[in-house]
Image (cartoon, rainbow, N blue to C red):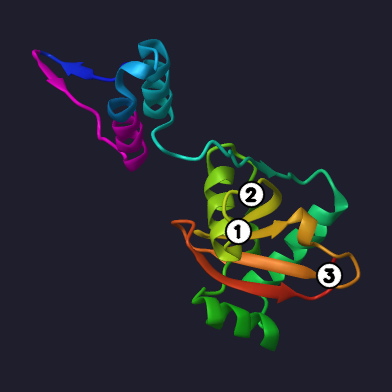
Amino acid sequence: MSLFTTTRDSIHEPEITPLTRIAMNYISLVGRRTPRIAALFLLFSVACIGGRPLRAQTATCIGTADSTSLRLQTYVRRVAAANDESSTRVRAMLGFAATDPTKVVVVTDTKTCPKVLAGVNSAFKSGAVSRSLYVYLIGRNYAAFDKREIVESQGGAVIFLDSRFVPLKIVLAPSVY
């Protein structure tokens, strides 16, 4: 990775983050007492990570292979399409229109899962946490269940997200599992 990017005849400096500025100040303060190779290594390391934490979050979307996923999908279909009082109330709270139950689809693709995970972590205000999720597309919106949060006899939290993966509500689902 280069510290500078070139386009045609011009050279552009990268954005200097606060962490990079601290490293540059440290290098100028220490000066000749520190071997230059160590100072360059420190500057290069800071430039490579860009001042961001190295903690990675991984998302695993669980498919339809297990019985829990099928029960959750049945619950999400009921919320999306049923005309009973509780389903209608949940849809009204979320701002969803009734959706054809065949439009409720299990999500397992690798591009959508990390986006849903970011929305779930935002809803739980938990930072970068890796999770195994059951994710369902409801028309243009999403419903996600964290596998760790599901309690067989008590139900669990359902995180509803809009089409941009912004959390709408966390709803406690009844014991449908």
Counting from the top left corner in percent of width and height, residue 11 is at 14, 19
Q: In the image, what residue type sits under mark 3?
A: Val
Q: Is residue 55 above or below residue 143?
A: above
Dots 1, 2 in contact, CB < 8 A: yes
Numbered-mark total: 3
Q: Position of residue 31 (x, y in %)?
A: 30, 21
Upstream in the sequence, badge 3 or badge 2?
2
Horizontal and vertical percent position of residue 123: 57, 64
Per the image, the residue denoted by label 1 is 126
Q: Is residue 86 above or below residue 128?
A: below
Residue range of the region highlighted in magenta in the rendering: 9-26
Q: Is residue 10 left or right of residue 5?
A: left
Please tell me whether residue 116 is drawn above or below residue 48 in the rendered image.
below
Q: Do labels 3 and 1 touch, CB within 8 Å?
A: no
Question: Picture coordinates of residue 171 (x, y %)?
Answer: 66, 74
Q: Residues within 10 Å of mark 1 (few under 14, many from 20)?
A: few
Q: Residue at x 61, y 64 (%)?
A: 124
Identify the mark at residue 176; answer none if there is no mark: 3
Indicate the amino acid at tag 2.
Val
Q: Which secondary structure, mark 2?
A: loop
Which residue sits at x=29%, y=20%? 3
